[in-house]
């Protein structure tokens, strides 16, 4: 496993309120909750030692890996091929429709297509950009992490039935845990990571399959709304889903990126926080979606933009800022995370964005 994988070696998953990044070797190294612009729980993308991560991969290093999405879907597959077998981790976040919530789930479905594979699970959360301490409670059904008003629950298989994958009891490793699971051809297992989800609960393969089917159905139905009929449908659909994944559904506001602190050039200092909505960039995003027939997204962003223009000067029309948070607030004071080294040493790592008060004449 590379200490800092290439930025391009990541897949994106999300539930339309927040998102996570998964590397090609099965590591979730970026996740904020409950929103795109909330403090991180996993941030190894920006500090491999202090950022936190959740990795599931074979217990050996002699594997070949490939990452892909299911067709017409936002379910991400990381496939591992070893001399003993072929296995995969399917990552997704069940879509949340409706009001904002603190409860978000990352589902990791394990499957072995051929032979045998022993997966190792390594979970090391670091709350509030690695600044907050946490406690951990292990149970037979998983683990519960607590930190300053935030909870993170790992739901696992619990008591096993005959024929279930062979899972080892999780053990404490530092501030996190490690466990292994041995699987044979045709077997399926699942793990659910949930914020503000209460005590750990037993998860059966059928539960994971149902979540996977429901999530897949949402994305297929959404894609079917597209009016695009050109020859590049597969690429256009994938781009549209990416834009949708970066849109905060409760308000309709798209973020410029689900990440922060990544450098414009390796080792450089221009490491900005892009988890906000620029009026110009958001308009271009919504224009692209509306041209494909996604008029609901356009209408919602229009209402969000109307609110920004009318909230100035006590409800009277006035100048707007160039960027906002997804909820429409504009407290974007910039702060430097001195304790993080940055992606491949690219520092400083910034949260917030001081450019919010700048004047931009082309919007």
Image (spheres, grey):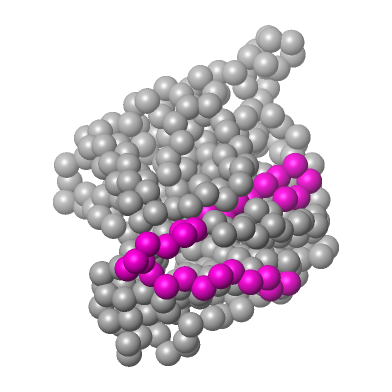
Q: How many marks?
A: 0
User: Is 302 located above or below residue 141 in the figure?
Assistant: above
- At horizontal 63% and vertical 14% (from top left) the residue drawn is 310
Q: Residue furthest front?
A: 162
User: Is 330 located above or below residue 210 in the figure?
Assistant: above
Which quarter of the image is occupied by the C terminus?
Answer: top right
Q: Is residue 250 left or right of residue 129?
A: left
Q: Is residue 134 left or right of residue 262?
A: right
Asked whether residue 256 is drawn in magenta, I would say no
Asked whether residue 150 is drawn in magenta, I would say yes
Q: Residue furthest right?
A: 338
Q: Position of residue 239 (x, y in %)?
A: 35, 50
- At horizontal 28% and vertical 31% (from top left) the residue drawn is 293
Q: Nearer the viewer, residue 151 or 330?
A: 151
- At horizontal 43% and vertical 44% (from top left) the residue drawn is 94
Q: Position of residue 262 (x, y in %)?
A: 63, 62
Which quarter of the image is occupied by the N terminus?
Answer: bottom right
- At horizontal 60% and vertical 66% (from top left) the residue drawn is 123
- For residue 226, say whether it is visible: no
Q: Is residue 314 left or right of residue 171?
A: right
- Which range is magenta? 146-174
Q: Quadrant of residue 308?
A: top right
Q: Position of residue 217 (x, y in %)?
A: 28, 41
- For residue 173, say whether it is visible: yes
Q: Position of residue 360 (x, y in %)?
A: 65, 36
Q: Quadrant of residue 270?
A: bottom right
Q: Nearer the viewer, residue 114 or 337?
A: 114
């Amino acid at each position: 496993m590379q200490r800092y994988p290439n930025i391009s070696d990541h897949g994106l998953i999300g539930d339309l309120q927040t998102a996570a990044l998964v590397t090609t070797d099965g590591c979730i190294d970026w996740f904020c909750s409950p929103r795109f612009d909330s403090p991180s729980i996993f941030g190894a993308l920006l500090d491999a030692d202090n950022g936190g991560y959740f990795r599931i991969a074979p217990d050996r290093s002699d594997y070949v890996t490939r990452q892909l999405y299911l067709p017409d879907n936002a379910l991400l597959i990381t496939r591992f091929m070893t001399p003993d077998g072929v296995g995969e981790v399917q990552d997704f976040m069940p879509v949340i429709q409706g009001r904002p919530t603190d409860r978000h789930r990352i589902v990791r479905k394990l499957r072995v297509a051929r032979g045998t594979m022993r997966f190792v699970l390594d979970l090391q959360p670091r709350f509030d950009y690695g600044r907050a301490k946490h406690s951990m409670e292990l149970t037979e059904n998983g683990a519960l992490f607590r930190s300053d008003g935030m909870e993170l629950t790992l739901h696992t298989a619990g008591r096993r039935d005959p024929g279930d994958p062979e899972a080892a009891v999780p053990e404490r490793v530092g501030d996190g845990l490690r466990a292994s699971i041995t699987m044979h051809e045709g077997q399926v297992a699942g793990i659910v990571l949930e914020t503000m989800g209460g005590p750990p609960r037993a998860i059966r393969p059928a539960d994971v399959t149902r979540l996977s089917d429901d999530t897949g159905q949402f994305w297929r139905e959404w894609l079917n709304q597209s009016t695009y009929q050109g020859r590049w449908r597969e690429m256009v659909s994938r781009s549209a889903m990416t834009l949708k994944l970066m849109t905060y559904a409760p308000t309709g506001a798209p973020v410029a990126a689900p990440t922060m602190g990544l450098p414009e050039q390796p080792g450089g200092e221009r490491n900005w926080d892009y988890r906000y909505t620029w009026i110009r960039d958001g308009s271009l995003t919504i224009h692209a979606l509306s041209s494909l027939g996604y008029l609901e997204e356009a209408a919602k962003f229009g209402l969000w933009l109307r609110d920004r223009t009318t909230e100035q000067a006590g409800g009277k029309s006035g100048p707007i800022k160039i960027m906002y948070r997804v909820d429409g607030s504009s407290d974007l004071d910039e702060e430097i995370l001195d304790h993080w080294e940055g992606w491949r040493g690219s520092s400083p790592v910034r949260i917030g964005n001081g450019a919010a008060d700048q004047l931009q004449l082309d919007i």
